[in-house]
Each structure stands twice: as structure tokens, then as C-alpha cells.
């Protein structure tokens, strides 16, 4: 399965609590951190919810 890199680029301060929890669920703990996730529908849904706070790059294999 394909992998995607999720990079946290904007602070969650001032946004809804559920968006902050979504960042944690993606595995992000601090600003400018990146994590590699499987490219699946649930992960894409979480990224869509916080798309204004993260950047997504496709990992080549």
C-alpha cells in the first residue's frame, strides 16, 4: 500500500478541540513534525478534517 508523509505546518491554537485531537490521532505532537502513514480512506478523512493545518506529500517507493 502507498505511504504518505503528513507535515504539521500550522498551530492548532484557536481551532476546535476535535481538530486538535485529530492531529494527535495522526501521530503529530509538535509543529513542523512529519509522520509517515498508510494511504487509506480513514487517514485521508483525518487529513481532510485538518487540511488547513497540515501538508501532505506522497512517498515514493
Image (tube, helix red, strand yellow):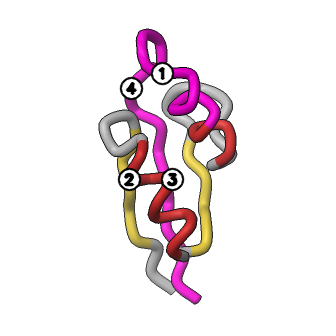
Q: Assign a secondary structure to mark 2.
A: helix
Front tag of 4 and 2: 2
Q: Assign a secondary structure to mark 1.
A: loop
- Spatial CA distance of label 4 from label 3 is 16 Å
Q: Which residue lies at the image location 38% right of the left edge and 56% below the top edge?
A: 56
* Sequence-earlier tag: 4 or 3: 4
Residue range (magenta): 1-21
Q: Assign a secondary structure to mark 4.
A: loop
What numbered label is drawn on residue 34?
A: none
Please state the horizontal and vertical placement of residue 57, each as a whole percent of the image.
Answer: 38, 62
Do the CB atoms of the residues marked 1 and 3 lie less than 8 Å apart?
no
Q: Residue furthest left?
A: 52
Image side of residue 32 versus residue 50, left or right: right
| Residue denoted by label 4 | 10
What numbered label is drawn on residue 48?
A: 2
- Spatial CA distance of label 4 from label 2 is 15 Å
* Sequence-earlier tag: 4 or 1: 4
* Sequence-earlier tag: 4 or 2: 4
- Spatial CA distance of label 4 from label 1 is 14 Å
Q: Assign a secondary structure to mark 3.
A: helix
* Sequence-earlier tag: 1 or 3: 1
What numbered label is drawn on residue 46?
A: 3
Amino acid at each position: 500500500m502507498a505511504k504518505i508523509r503528513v507535515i504539521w505546518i500550522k498551530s492548532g491554537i484557536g481551532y476546535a478541540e476535535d481538530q486538535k485531537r485529530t492531529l494527535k490521532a495522526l501521530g503529530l505532537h509538535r509543529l513542523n513534525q512529519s509522520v509517515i502513514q498508510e494511504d487509506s480512506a480513514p487517514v485521508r478523512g483525518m487529513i481532510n478534517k485538518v487540511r488547513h493545518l497540515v501538508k501532505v506529500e506522497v512517498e515514493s517507493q
